[in-house]
Amino acid sequence: MTTNDLIATLEKLRSTKHTDLDAELVRDVVTAQADFMANPNEAFKRISQAVEAHLTRKEKP
Amino acid sequence: MLALQQLQLENFGPYKGQHTIDFPSDGGVVIVYGENMRGKTTLLNAIRYALFGTVLTRREARLTFANIENWENAHEGKHGFKVILRFSHDGAAYELTRECRLRRDVATPQSDSDYEHHCYLQRNGEALGPEETKDELVRIMPESVSRFFLFDGELLQQYEELLRDESEMGQRIKESIERILGVPILTNARTSVKRLLDEAQKAESKAAQKSQETQELGNNHMRLLEQRSAHESEIVRLSRDAQELKTKKRGYEEEVKKYERLLTLFNERERLNREVADVERRQAEKESRLKEVMAGAWRGVLGPKLREAIATLESRRDTLQAADSRKAAIVYLSELIDQGIATGNCPTCSEGLTDTSRSAMAALKDRLVHEAQQSTNATELAEVLRKVSILKEAESEFSPALVQELTDGIEDCRVEKHVRTHRLSEIEEATRSLDESEHRRIQADYDNSVKEITLVEHGIQRERDALAKVEQDIEKVQRKLDQLGGADLARDRHRREVSKRLFDLLNEAVDVYRNELRQRVERDASELFRKLTTEAEYKGLQINENYGLRIVHSDGSVVPVRSAGAEHIVALSLMGALQKNAPLQGPIIMDSPFGRLDDQHTTKVVDSLPDMAAQVMLLVYESEMEPRLARSRLQGHLKREYQIGRVTARHSTIEVRHE
């Protein structure tokens, strides 16, 4: 199983039961976590940035 | 993917001086042959030491540096050791050096603190700093999943623990399995998103507190968030405590096991002491009784005389009693004669008596009365009866059989006591230099740790219940805030909502992903199992919640009991399935993997090795897997063979094996 398999599992779940969530955001969150497994603080920072970027994208007209 | 290139040892374990094992760059199988006690496990330990800085025994106790260094060198006053591991990972070349040297101010090491320990990591020729080294090594090979890469065949039976829900070892292996399969990516992401959610909620509270309209709700919200945070911190603290206690308990378990035989001896000694006291009591009772009996022993000496006297007296008694009976009959007859003479009629048939008859009856009566007077001696009879009674009593109070029984019983007690005191002296000898109180303390510590774990786990449950209640309250306040909050709260609310949705998705995904993994592991382990097993009626494996695997028969039933060999095959199937499904790929190093397998299973496992991992290193003894078999089965996959040679019991060498 790779990170892509993990993302695929999440996408399947998102597209069926959590459609109000953005697919790109979910992918960014999982990728950030997978890339920084040995550094939880950096992983949190990247996830936080992904959420902020998502909110900003949504706020733009 | 992690691929080993070279392992270099210096004065590590039995390997005195410098020794090298090269791993071909195109993967395949490398076999190291060595008989027992030559240093096969040491090679596994050397890789473990290089990657993690520690060496563990089979019971998971940490080996001291003094136990790792070459003993022959140490005997010569030269201490310290070094391991260099060269490998590649995701396209980069690494050189990892771990070295242990004796401190300059120490001549003879007493403990690990007498050594200096160094670790250096180079990536593509560039040295990394200590923190980066640590992070990089965790990224390349986390210790928590090392059991799936560096494994000891003797410990494969541990995987059976996965079938026991309550097993602590099973729980630890399950966590390791989930780590290697990547579940922590999801669980850690969930933790990060939860932190974001908490922060968003706090930001919302603060924003609400600033507005007059929502101030009270904001205060209430903040108070509840603080309560939740306190409960969560307490759960984390208690969980950590529980973990520490479980670690301690495992340590105590090891100690308890170590001293189990001694404790058995101590318990046996206690039991024997109790038994000796009991035997002594019984012996004293018997001796006392014997003393009493022996006080009448003179009766025993006079026994035959007594019996003779009793017989004479009894004979006399019988004569006297017969005479007594005759006298009673005479009295009765005399009365009848008197009646006949007086009435002139026969007292029996009432016929009239003649004078002649009456005279004859009177003469008969006189003779009978005379006879009765002659034989009457009531005083003598009473005297005889008294004497018989006294003599019989004297005879009955002394029984040689009783004396014999008591003497035998006392002898038995002496033998019993001797056997027990002899065993006691053996136990005394075996435990002379040991501190019994220390061992009792360890047992008590173990018992206490079990109790403490139960208490802490109850505490965690209480906190969880309280947390659930606070969460409900937070939700209520949150709903009110959502109704009242203005545009100034919008950004925080959106952040909170997105974080919440993400959290819910990740939370659900953890279970979904786990199920997917279980299905994949079951499928791949079954496939490998069918290749490895020699039993055609077994159709595959069935996985449980903890990744424990049961053998399934072709009729659909689960095989309830399995042999050590079958256990081994199931564990190897799990290993293969995990390797196939893990995001982290690396070499498999197996120490004595065929010890429990018959020839057919060994052949099948050898055939499957190239499919299990790109790089495999086998540490075996020749009778476990014959070199001829390995060559014929592996053919081109077998890249190199090494032989561990013996110089002395404390000095081994590694040589390339040529046939």
Image: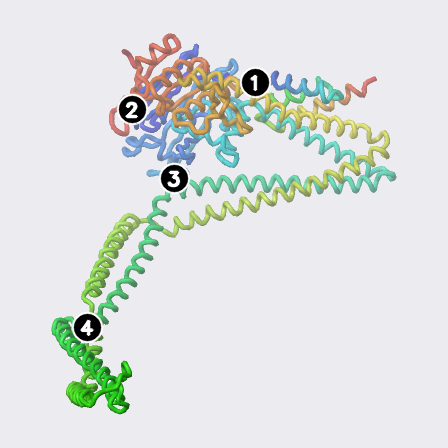
Q: How far apart are marks 2 and 3 (CA)?
A: 31 Å
Residue B395: numbered disc: 4
Q: Quadrant of the C terminus of chain B?
A: top left
Of label 2 and label 3, which has the lower sequence position?
A: 2
Task: Write down the residue under mark 1.
Answer: A1
- Residue at 26% over, 51% down: B423
In this rendering, would B600 be left or right of B166? Answer: left
Residue B238: numbered disc: none
Same chain, labels 3 and 1? no
Same chain, labels 1 and 4? no
Q: Distance between the residues labelled 3 and 4?
A: 81 Å
What SS does tag 4 mark? Answer: helix
Q: Residue furthest top?
A: B636
Disc 4 and disc 2 in contact, CB within 8 angstroms: no
- Asked which quadrant contains residue B503, the reply is top right
In this rendering, would B77 be left or right of B247? Answer: left
Residue B35: numbered disc: 2
In this rendering, would B659 be left or right of B444? Answer: left
Task: Write down the residue under mark 3.
Answer: B111
Same chain, labels 3 and 4? yes
Chain assignment, label 4: B
